[in-house]
Image (tube, helix red, strand yellow):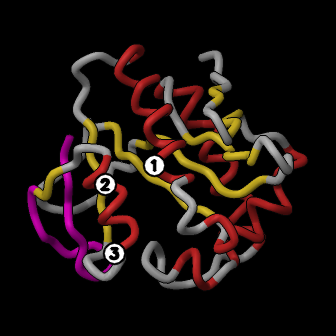
């Protein structure tokens, strides 16, 4: 079993999800503004529960996964970010990469939290998985996430279809 890290930045704590996070996690994935460019449809509590269990399983089997993002000043859960291996059926394939993902509550948008959290996570991954390629997929309409990906050094490698048009990026 992999030890799941806790990372701290100037304004954030990135830590393992706990059962106490479920209500906030479910609220995040039920928010239409959050899922607009990710799944397109709010998640049910059941779907959110499965997603939270997938997060734990990713850490167990892959040695990486998502972390809860908590604002240090307020102590509030504001989102989550991390890595996954989803084995998505898409071409070109990103299987075998650490797929970077993030989602923040609307109240946390536009404050630089995604870039701050992902900078810490990518630094952690570079230490623990040196040389392992990273990727991300983003809707071409999601301008905010496209800016975050560019700040983190991701470059567009393809446009493809996966639940609607997406842009693939590599780092």
Disc on the earlier residue, 3 or 2: 3
Task: Confirm whether residue 47 shows in the render.
Answer: no
- x, y (%) of residue 125? 41, 25
- Does residue 124 sit above or below 43 in this rendering? above
Q: Residues within 10 Å of mark 1 (few under 14, many from 20)?
A: some
Between residue 24 and residue 116, name the one nearer to us.
116
Crowdedness near tag 2: few (<14), some (14–19) or many (≥20) residues, C-alpha within 10 Å: many
In the picture provided, is 146 more to the left or to the right than 116?
left
Main secondary structure type of the part rendered in magenta? strand
First in sequence: mark 3 or mark 1? 1
Q: CA distance from mark 3 to mark 1?
A: 14 Å
**164 to the left or right of 113:** left
Please state the extent of the stretch shown in magenta in the rendering. Answer: 157-171
In reply to whether residue 85 is colored magenta, the answer given is no
Can residue 92 be seen from the camera position used here? yes
User: Would you name the residue on which mark 3 appears?
Assistant: 143
Q: Which numbered circle lies on residue 149?
A: 2
Task: Label 1: state its secondary structure.
Answer: helix
The residue singled out by tag 1 in the image is 115
Marks 1 and 2, the one that precedes in the sequence:
1
Q: Secondary structure at mark 2?
A: helix
As rendered, which of 25 and 151 lies closer to the eye? Answer: 151
**Quarter occupied by the C terminus:** top left
Which secondary structure, mark 3?
Answer: helix
């Amino acid at each position: 079993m992999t030890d799941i890290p806790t990372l701290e930045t100037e304004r954030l704590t990135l830590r393992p999800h706990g059962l106490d996070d479920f209500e906030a996690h479910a609220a995040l994935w039920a928010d239409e503004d959050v899922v607009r460019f990710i799944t397109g449809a709010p998640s049910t509590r059941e779907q959110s529960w499965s997603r939270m269990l997938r997060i734990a399983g990713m850490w167990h089997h892959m040695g990486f996964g998502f972390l809860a993002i908590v604002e240090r000043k307020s102590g509030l859960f504001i989102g989550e970010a991390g890595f996954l291996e989803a084995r998505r059926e898409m071409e070109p394939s990103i299987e075998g990469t650490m797929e970077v993902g993030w989602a923040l509550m609307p109240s946390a948008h536009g404050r630089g939290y995604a870039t701050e959290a992902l900078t810490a996570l990518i630094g952690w991954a570079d230490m623990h998985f040196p040389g392992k390629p990273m990727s991300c997929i983003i809707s071409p309409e999601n301008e905010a996430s496209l800016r975050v990906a560019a700040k983190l050094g991701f470059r567009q490698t393809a446009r493809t279809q996966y639940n609607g048009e997406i842009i693939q990026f590599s780092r």
